[in-house]
Amino acid sequence: MRVVSSALAFGMAVVLLDTACSGQPQGAVTDLLSDDPSVRSDAAFRLGQARSKEAVDALIAALNDPEETVRVNVIRALGDIGDPKAIVPIVPFVGDSLSAVRMATCQALGALRDLRGLPALEKALYDDDESIRIVAARALGEVPGPESLEVLLRVALQDESERIR
């Protein structure tokens, strides 16, 4: 009897958890509009973790948030979700003045694995910040096709840094 009760309780917990998680993306989408930047940042993070395709448009709308941490988490979330319609809107952020935003953009473009991100990743290979160049080179390795390999061979192997070559 005790085993049956434990199994029933566990089953109910799983159902409740599943129900709570399925409602999470909508609440997080609403949180993207909060006045509190930490709430907006956390919302973007949760949407990325949930891989919520329904949230892509709201995340794209949040790309120009004035707070760095929000922009970084929005870009990461778009990469985590993997919807190709995020590529064009995030490409300009490879030239952002903040290195964390540039790095998140390179990571997201690598995760999206789409050739439309190649010009931005190639641009990032010329970044003054070595860590951005490293992340861009790794991201290029994620993009399938001979075009990404050609960029790596042409640009990355000529880099002054041994870590990139």
Image (cartoon, rainbow, N blue to C red):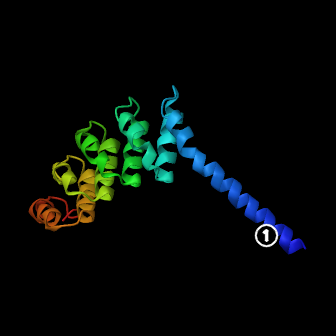
Q: Quadrant of the N terminus?
A: bottom right
> In the image, what residue type sits under mark 1?
Ala
Q: Nearest the camera: 162 or 76?
A: 76
On the rendered structure, is 143 left or right of 19?
left
Where 60 sits versus 79, above or below? above
Q: Which residue is mark 1?
A: 7
Where 36 sits versus 103, above or below? above
Residue, x 76% and y 64% (percent of image)? 10
Q: Position of residue 21 (x, y in %)?
A: 60, 51
Q: Nearest the camera: 116 or 129?
A: 116
SS at mark 1 in the image: helix
Where 117 sits versus 88, above or below? below
Q: Position of residue 88 (x, y in %)?
A: 24, 44
On the rendered structure, is 15 left or right of 42?
right
Residue, x 51% and y 25% (percent of image)? 35
Q: Nearest the camera: 51 or 93?
A: 51
On the rendered structure, is 108 left or right of 114?
right
Q: Quadrant of residue 100?
A: top left
Asked if residue 121 shows in the view, the reply is no
Q: Quadrant of residue 140?
A: bottom left
Q: Quadrant of residue 148?
A: bottom left
